[in-house]
Amino acid sequence: MDDCIFCQIAQGTADSWKVYETDSAYAFLDIHPVNEYHTLVIPKNHYVNIFDVPEHELVQVISALKHVVDLYHDRLGIGNVQIVNSSGAQAQQDVFHLHFHIIPRYKGDQQDIRWSTYPEMRARFDQLLARLL
């Protein structure tokens, strides 16, 4: 897509700081980093989110993600990361090209992600699972 910044980055028509590249995936430093080495991993083909990507392409993206995580662990000693994907506007997706964040985490970095939990939902688990059958 011509107007998608991540497509432009994957095609080499927009600037990026490449970390790793395969035939199917591209990893680069996030221009709005949370921490050092905050990296985005994207498929080279345009898919809006996790619901759109074919499984075989997702496998390639996750393989590239694993390569980058291992690279950071082996070369930099990074032993704590968060892997984040937001798919859909209500899930806080802001660039509508599938992407995964690799965010190195450090003690005291004050970038905690916190969720509100609802233990009372456990009473409905059987009903929730029944809808999947």
Image (cartoon, rainbow, N blue to C red):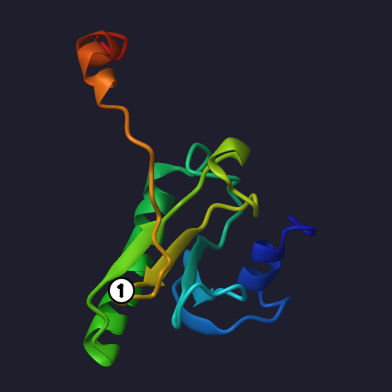
Within-10-Å neighbours for mark 1: few <14, some 14–19, many 20+: many
Give the quadrant of the C terminus: top left
Percent from the top left, x then y, of residue 120? 26, 20
Give the quadrant of the N terminus: bottom right
Amino acid type shown at disc 1: Val
The one nearer the camera, 2 or 35, is 35
Looking at the picture, does residue 8 appear above or below residue 122?
Answer: below
Looking at the picture, does residue 109 appear above or below residue 113?
Answer: below
Q: Give the number of marks.
A: 1
Name which quarter of the figure residue 65 lies in. bottom left
Q: Residue at (54%, 52%) from the top-left corner? A: 98
Q: Residue at (78%, 59%) from the top-left corner? A: 2
Relative placement, left or right, of 60 versus 107 is: right
Relative placement, left or right, of 133 versus 102 is: left
Looking at the picture, does residue 131 appear above or below residue 107?
Answer: above
Relative placement, left or right, of 12 versus 52 is: right
Percent from the top left, x then y, of residue 15? 69, 81
Q: Residue at (25%, 77%) from the top-left corner? A: 70
Q: To which residue does mark 1 refer? A: 69
Name which quarter of the figure residue 81 lies in. bottom left
The one nearer the camera, 101 or 3, is 101
Circle 1: element type:
helix
The one nearer the camera, 102 or 108, is 108
Which residue, as the protein is rendered here, is positioned at the far bottom? Answer: 75
